[in-house]
Amino acid sequence: DAWQGRGVGRLLMRRLIDAARDSGYRCMTGSVLSSNRGMLDLAGALGFTARRGDQGGNIVDVVRTLS
């Protein structure tokens, strides 16, 4: 859509990471479709690591330590 590529997702994710850290969370995880290259790239740029998900072959789990 017209909002893609404008940094809105990156801004929202950074604020979510900060809010989770400020609330005392030590780790963030997410499940991403393996075909969602944009989200996987964004997660990597924000310090998340990716691994094959337990849900099946088309899911990638992304994990980031917040401490």
Image (spheres, rainbow, N blue to C red):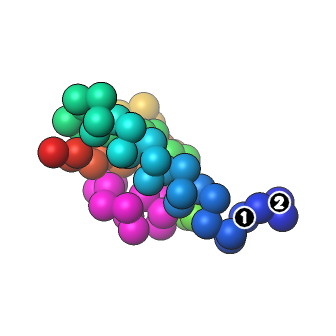
* Mark number displayed over residue 1: 2
User: Residue 20, located in which quarter of the rendered image?
Assistant: top left
Look at the image and say whether residue 25 sits in the magenta stretch: no
- Asked if marks 1 and 2 touch (Cβ < 8 Å), the reply is yes
Residue 20 visible in the shown view: yes
Q: Percent position (x, y) of residue 40? A: 48, 59
The secondary element bearing badge 1 is classed as loop
Q: Is residue 59 above or below residue 49?
A: above
- Name which residue lies at 30% across and 46% down: 63
The number of numbered badges drawn on the structure is: 2
The amino acid pointed to by label 1 is Gln
The secondary element bearing badge 2 is classed as loop
The amino acid pointed to by label 2 is Asp
User: Residue 9, located in which quarter of the rendered image?
Assistant: bottom right
Q: Which residues are magenta?
A: 39-52
How many residues crowd mark 2 within 10 Å: few (<14), some (14–19), many (20+)?
A: few
Task: Between residue 58 and residue 51, name the one nearer to us.
Answer: 51
How many residues crowd mark 1 within 10 Å: few (<14), some (14–19), many (20+)?
A: few
User: Residue 53, located in which quarter of the rendered image?
Assistant: top left
Q: Residue furthest toward the right? A: 2
Q: Quadrant of the C terminus?
A: top left
Determine which residue is flagged by label 1.
4
- Name which residue lies at 23% across and 29% down: 24
- Name which residue lies at 47% across and 66% down: 41
- Name which residue lies at 21% across and 46% down: 65
* Mark number displayed over residue 51: none
Q: Is residue 36 left or right of residue 29?
A: right
Q: Percent position (x, y) of residue 30? A: 42, 39
